Image (spheres, rainbow, N blue to C red):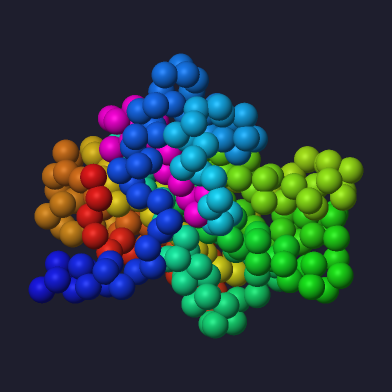
Amino acid sequence: MRAKQAAEIEADAPTLTRKWQDLRAVAAEVKRFRLGALQLCESILDDRLIEKHARSFFAGLPDDERHYWIASLYALLMPPTRRRRLAVYFTPPHLAQYAIDVLIDAGVRPGVHRILDPASGGAAFLVPLASRIAKECRRRGLKGNDVLCRIEGTLAGIEVESELASLSMSLLRELLSEEMAVADRRKLQIRIECANSLTQDEPGEPYDAVIGNPPYGRIFRPSRKLLKTYAPVITDGYARQPGSHRRLHRASIFLLNRKSPPGSWRRWPLRLTPRQ
């Protein structure tokens, strides 16, 4: 029954302009350049990649889809074992926009309230949030440094994969290139910390809202400290098995109570169908 419902929801979702099978073909082609995954993705962002299939794939895409596919290409270029271990999967643009709409309907004001994505991956939420803040600032006549300060003061991310954190910053720099040019090309200072949200201490200043799509992988052989921290969401049977696994999304939902105070807003779009 659940599988049927998930299939119906997936069928109703907007269709992306490009296909996964085409992206896999692009990944196979660009591997010939013997560059790292981050270097290849940044060369696409900077329009420096000359491989014709890759240029054709990314040409003419809306910014949100382009960023989604660049981050997804990074995932395909990762070593398979690491990709599986980190359960790398990025939120499609229409789901990210929907989650942000729900937060706004609940009273969250991007650019005013402090928002954290503790599993920020390829900036699937940070980029559209920054875009909405920038558009609202432009509507109000703000430019350059004022726009950047508004975004830097209200958005933050945490990502365990260091190169993904770097790619997120590259995506944000491309999005805000106009503002950076007006602000004398100063360095963008959005905080994307390279760390594991599940093992971090509580933030010094609580966030007003937490949004994200936590990895749906597994934690093998967790430490006693981690078991104690997440005891409320681990069954007794699992807790007695030192080699058992814990679902990361369950622990991530529990994490909300550590990253945001009572009365704050939370939104986690859950995966509709399993992915390898």
State the residue in front, 50 or 172.
50
Residue at position x 61%, y 45% in the image: 171
**Residue 36 visible in rendering:** yes
Residue at position x 16%, y 44% in the image: 244
Answer with left or right where residue 116 lies relative to residue 130: left
Answer with left or right where residue 239 lies relative to residue 79: left
State the residue in front, 118 or 19.
19
Q: Quadrant of the C terminus?
A: top left
- Magenta run includes residue 78: yes
**Residue 226 visible in rendering:** no
Residue 194: where, in percent of width, then height? 54, 39
Residue at position x 87%, y 48% in the image: 183
Numbered range of the magenta stretch: 65-84
Residue 239: where, in percent of width, then height? 19, 51
Q: Quadrant of the N terminus?
A: bottom left
Compared to residue 72, the image places residue 53 above or below, namely above
Displayed quadrant of residue 75: top left
Answer with left or right where residue 267 lies relative to residue 153: left
Answer with left or right where residue 83 lies relative to residue 41: left
Displayed quadrant of residue 234: bottom left
- Magenta run includes residue 46: no
Compared to residue 48, the image places residue 176 above or below, namely below
Image mark count: 0
State the residue in front, 142 or 40.
40
Residue 187: where, in percent of width, then height? 78, 40
Displayed quadrant of residue 153: bottom right
Main secondary structure of the magenta stretch: helix
